[in-house]
Amino acid sequence: MKKFTYIFSVLAIVLTTFTARPASAMEKGVLSVFGPIIGMPIGAVAGLVRGTLSKSYEYADTLSESMGDGTLGRAVGIPLGLVIGSATGSVTGVVKGLYDGFVIGIEDPLSAESASVDGKLLDYEPYDVFQGQKVEQAQ
């Protein structure tokens, strides 16, 4: 039964790869199969960590500033922002990591971008997975 499950999983990934992005898969060959296999688990973990950190920091900063950035604003805004940002950032970070691992893993196999480890740690926008494209951030 284990052998059947393994063979079925590999065939499902190969067929999905070649039906999702046939031109990229044919161009890259075997690497386009191994790109998602390696990129999706690494991307999910990296997305979880980076999404949690970036959104919790962003929400804590935004909430404390909107509450006046004084002692009371920081006492309420930072813990609340950390909780909300951690929850939303972790979920969307995992989704974005899986998406990048699959899609970019086919187009650019075994790259830093397919594993969601490109750029600075806090310079990560997990919400852009819902827009279907990268959000250009002002630098």
Image (spheres, rainbow, N blue to C red):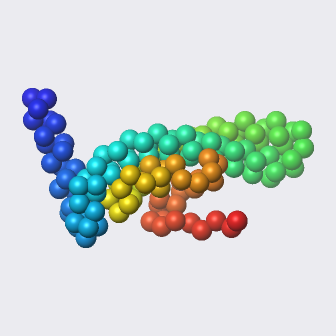
Residue drawn at (18%, 45%) of the image: 10
Q: Is residue 24 left or right of residue 96?
A: left
Q: Is residue 96 left or right of residue 103?
A: right
In-front residue for pair 55/71: 55
- Tally the numbered discs: 0
Residue 95 seen by the camera: no
Quarter of the image with the C terminus in it: bottom right
Point out residue 6 in the picture as x, y percentages from the top left corner: 16, 36
Point out residue 107 in the picture as x, y percentages from the top left corner: 35, 63
Q: Is residue 45 above or below residue 21?
A: above
Point out residue 96 in the picture as x, y percentages from the top left corner: 46, 52
In-front residue for pair 113/129: 113
- Of all residues, the one furthest to the right in this rendering is 70
- Of all residues, the one furthest to the bottom in this rendering is 23
Occupied quadrant, residue 49:
top right
Occupied quadrant, residue 1:
top left
Residue drawn at (57%, 44%) of the image: 50
Residue drawn at (58%, 42%) of the image: 52
Point out residue 15 in the picture as x, y percentages from the top left corner: 17, 56
Residue 117 seen by the camera: yes
Residue drawn at (18%, 42%) of the image: 9
